[in-house]
Image (spheres, grey):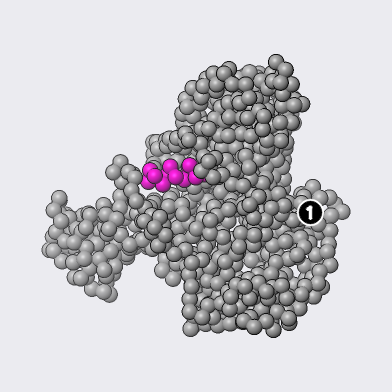
Amino acid sequence: MSKENKKRSIRPDGMAKVTGSLSYLTDLSFPDMLYGKILRSQHPHAKIISIDTSRAEQLPGVAAIITAKDVPGLNGFGIVMPDQPVFCKDRVRYVGDAIAAVAAASVEIAEKALERIEVVYKPLPVIDSPKKALDPAAPVLHAGGNILHRAENRRGDVETAFTHCAVLVEETYRVPRQMHTYMETEGGVVVPEKNGGITVYCGSQHGYKDRFQLSRILGMEEGKIRVVSSPIGGSFGGKDELNIQPYAALLALATGRPVKIHQTRRESVLSSIKRHPMEIKVKTGADENGKLLAFGALIIADTGAYSTLGPAVLDFAVEHAVGPYIIPNVEVTGLSVFTNNGVSGEFRGFGGNQVTFALEGQMDRLAEKLQLDPAEIRRRNLRKKDDRGPLGHQIAETTGASDVLKAIKKKLEPKIGEADRYNDQHKWKKRGAGLAITMHGGGLGYGRLDPAGGRLRFTKEGKIEIAFGFEEAGQGILSVIEKITCSSLGCSKKDLSIVVGDTSLVPSTGSTTASRGTSMVWHALQRMKGEFRRKLAERAGEVTGIPASRLQLGKGGIFLGNSRVLDYGRLAKHMARNDPVEVTVKFDFPVTPDKINGGHFLYAFAGTAAEVEVDLLTGSVKVVGLDQVVAAGPVVNEIGYTGQIEGGSVMALGYTLMEDAAMKEGRYLVENLDQYFIPTIADVPFHMEVEPIEDLVAGDLYGPRGVGEIGSVAVAPAVAKAIHHAIGFWATRLPVSPEDILLFGTKEGDGRWNMKKQLNP
């Protein structure tokens, strides 16, 4: 792609967003609209003895109250396994479980109606940790037991290899439950249509998948359900699963009127999916030269009450547990465990963030034991261009791992010297620098339905319409589509009409998830552009009398050489309406040819360098610098690329230093953002640099890889190493707390920092 096409430009939805004129789906209103509210469980685990809605039904302004008996089809949802009840009728398994829903003339009336619904519960023992769930005497939460999914990666003989290691590192890492904290909480409007169907205006990452799930719940043909799912005020994986759609749809059908549901932040906290908390026990061994010989890990993920994409997240974590390193003996076991905690599901990084914190922490500890530079021990174990993937499967050849390590090492070296000089001059504040690297597979992986496609059409208005089933969730997919289409066809953005996020207008092109959007747009255009240009040139040849072989598409119209001979508007007027130019393509995201469940084929790589400042009096950590080097193929849109990496970096800072949606006895300890802190502009490092590595190996035909997730993955271990460089503290759990640092300083501090020595030098 040319430098001109990559230069910074205003994104198609940019002006409307910054001026506030763009309407999000929760902004929509319709005539005669009702407002919905959902009654959630009062207990994390209980039997339902009875549900009485009679008092609520008598409240003036209440139009409908629905429970499980009012679900005409399948009373369950879930992207892979529909094991989460739309409405619980005999048992609740977490505090977000839905019991009933109300539609009323106002939000206030709907809330009063919820208060009048009488539910009698019999509390059951609460399983609030995987450890309790795995106890043979524990209550069984689902028919198949308390283990949702198992995954493994095994090769060689790990136990024998450990006996031959010069150094061993054993550690247990604990990572927290994290909220997506999107600006627009779950919500939207469902409108009943005259044909008996519905239109669903609700934020989602996969309109067609939502349509499929709703058809099962409603007992309705998919063709009678239209899902409008764009624009969305943030998602990060959190709206990949159904949320309020079933309730608004059932209420709209029950009342024959539009129904809006927009969750408060508290309602969102209680019911929405979160990042999987994990406990990761790791043992890693190397020889005296730092060559990795063996790697063993046990990953236990708290998946909460229901499945959603818990199995796929665990598979991804197991696959990426050894990252970009070649290790001859591997034994990784993963368990995803049901509990009565909040539902864990898909979140930016999809299990990679958790295991990368553990893996890179092991590499740094090995380096210290062997007195090796942290970058050097990584270099000695990095995968090479044609090495197989983490599961021993074939992947696209790439030098991404070595490319990012070399570049990030160069950025880190001067920062280490600067930190050391700073520390010589300051007593109560210490600085440190650290690096980490990672690899991240794009797409859903082998054995998972991962369809893609797209459509090009020349409209009667003389526009080149490009349509995808993707959603604009703030990530900038509209800019990507605009840039790639203009580059592929030679047209200008004024010639385009971009259509996304409406199942009645777009082809099914798969989910807006798994870092697949940019890649799939590029692949679709490669497949469509030749035929579309040929067909449009043929129509132009019929109008101008010039042979189609001599004509080409350009900005504003059809060109012969450097001269425009026909603009698109005139061409549209001369074309017969029953003879449209349209090209549609369907294909699947590239996967490994090896039959490895979940194995990926296209990977992006990142190297992260972090600089921190630790306040020895308060234990607080401030990240003062954060650089990323990313190898993900050609950059499509420079500002969008940078924005994704910077945004992912800041989100990861929250995960590393402040965010923990902690639960106790199945209840959230915080239910709003007044106590759950996320990074603000004050927490963003003044110095952030993003360096793309665009080179692909010779013969690579797969184009740009996605960067929606990769920027968030290696931040935590880089910050953890920077803290260690500053004060000698090894973090084993996230978020890194001031209390842990102060405790270390008073009881365990090494030569770099010991509180007693600081106070009495």
Residue drawn at x 61%, y 43% as measured from the top left:
655
The magenta span reads: 636-648
Which residue is at the front of the view, 251 or 145? 251
Which residue is at the front of the view, 245 or 573? 245
Task: Where is residue 191? Give x, y as percent.
Answer: 51, 76
Q: Looking at the image, is 73 positioned above or below residue 466?
A: below
- Left or right, 715 with respect to 112, comes to left
Q: Looking at the image, is 67 positioned above or below residue 341?
A: below
Residue drawn at x 57%, y 62% as measured from the top left:
186
Residue drawn at x 75%, y 26% as measured from the top left:
746
- Left or right, 370 with respect to 25, comes to right
Would residue 148 be visible to someone looking at this image? Answer: no
Most extreme residue toward the top is 761
Q: Looking at the image, is 576 positioned above or below residue 486?
A: below
Residue 646 among magenta residues: yes
What residue does disc 1 label? 665
Task: Where is residue 745? Give x, y as percent.
Answer: 71, 26
Would residue 569 be visible to someone looking at this image? Answer: yes
- Left or right, 500 with respect to 167, comes to left
Q: Dot 1: within a 10 Å radius of its alpha carbon, few (fewer than 14), some, or many (20 or more) residues?
A: some
Which residue is at the front of the view, 399 or 749? 749
- Left or right, 21 with respect to 32, comes to left
Most extreme residue toward the right is 137
Q: Where, by quadrant of the figure, is residue 380 drawn?
A: top right
> Which structural element holds mark 1?
loop
Most common SS among magenta residues: helix
**Of the residues shown, which amino acid type is indicated by label 1?**
Glu
